[in-house]
Amino acid sequence: MRERFEGDAGRVRLIEALSKQDIVQYDAALATALAEAGTLVTLAPGQNVVTQGGSDNSVFFLLAGEASLLVHDRPFGTRGESTCVGEMAAIDSSAKRAATIQAATDMVALEVQESAFRKSPDDHPMAYKALAQLLGQRLRERSRFVRPPNPRPVLFVGSSSEGVSIANELQAGFKHDPFDAIVWPNGVFGPGGVAFDSLEQMAERAAFAAFVISPDDTVLSRDNEKPAPRDNVIFELGLFMGHLARERVFLVKELSSDVKIPSDLLGVTPVTYTWKQGTAVEAAIGPVCHEIRKAIKAQGPR
């Protein structure tokens, strides 16, 4: 099967197959970049693509065949064409492989080294959203395991470092409520890569999530520069949207702030506040806490 993706004609088929991958989503430039960065590998039935506990961190884009997903040697699911495996270890360079992926049939895959995989979303930012959706989908797969109930509901509060003062005010505003508001302390992207294990654990614990959106970066959209939230906040938001229902996720932003938000996130409940320089932030955040409090009471624990 490997020969189907070799040579000039095979390269066309390879790029076409990569364009169908769930994190590529028909981005021809991204598919081409991955094709140039990767190496074709073949696997026989029973051969491991990745092994649980391993410290390698390449990502494998499955082009042909089917693989079994094993956790502690127990079947957990399958992986087929048009998806990738090993992305978690590549995102978090300090993490070991969380599962074994074993070829169930003859397989062909494209192996992409961690450095090249991490560069791809930087050069093609929309891949972050697709990657977040994929990780959210895989988090939902894990929900088949029994999750112990929390004695108190948890509200996850995410922000960039620039918006952490607002996040802390939200946390303070909920100190007397019958749920715990927890501010994510580190952000997603740090020197060691994505702290995905910790973020995954928080996604499993949380019943609600609120994200402080602030104009931390700029993006070029239709030849116009517009303020935009930090990529890590959008990543976290997409991940929690995949794990929680939309009505359990809130966007918190200053009313006059003209922040460009990806259109796929517009269905998330927006909660706005008005704050003027020199006035107390607590007073501005009070109505936000009230709106979120009402929504949490209406939704109840998860």
Image (cartoon, grey):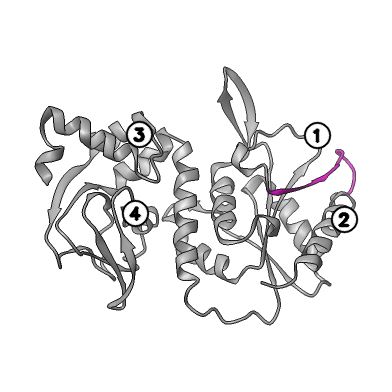
Q: Secondary structure at mark 1?
A: loop
Which tag, 2 or 1, sits closer to the chain's start?
Answer: 1
Q: Which residue lies under the disc numbered 3?
A: 30
Q: How many marks?
A: 4
- Does 149 appear in magenta? no
Query: Relative to residue 52, is residue 297 drawn left or right?
Result: right
Q: Which residues are magenta?
A: 268-280
Where residue 40 sits in the image (x, y, percent)?
A: 16, 45
Mark 2 Cα shell of 10 Å, populated few (<14), some (14-19), many (≥20): some
Query: Relative to residue 187, is residue 163 drawn left or right?
Result: right
Which tag, 3 or 4, sits closer to the chain's start?
Answer: 3
Mark 4 Cα shell of 10 Å, populated few (<14), some (14-19), many (≥20): many
State the CA–CA distance, disc 4 to disc 1.
38 Å
State the CA–CA distance, disc 1 to disc 3.
35 Å
Q: Quadrant of residue 154?
A: bottom right
Q: Which residue lies under the disc numbered 4?
A: 90
The image's mark for residue 286 is: 2
The C terminus lies in quadrant: bottom right
Residue 195 seen from this side: no
State the CA–CA distance, disc 2 to disc 3.
44 Å
Query: Relative to residue 68, is residue 187 drawn left or right?
Result: right
Badge 2 amino acid: Gly
Q: Quadrant of residue 276?
A: top right
Q: Secondary structure at mark 3?
A: helix
Q: Which residue lies under the disc numbered 1?
A: 256
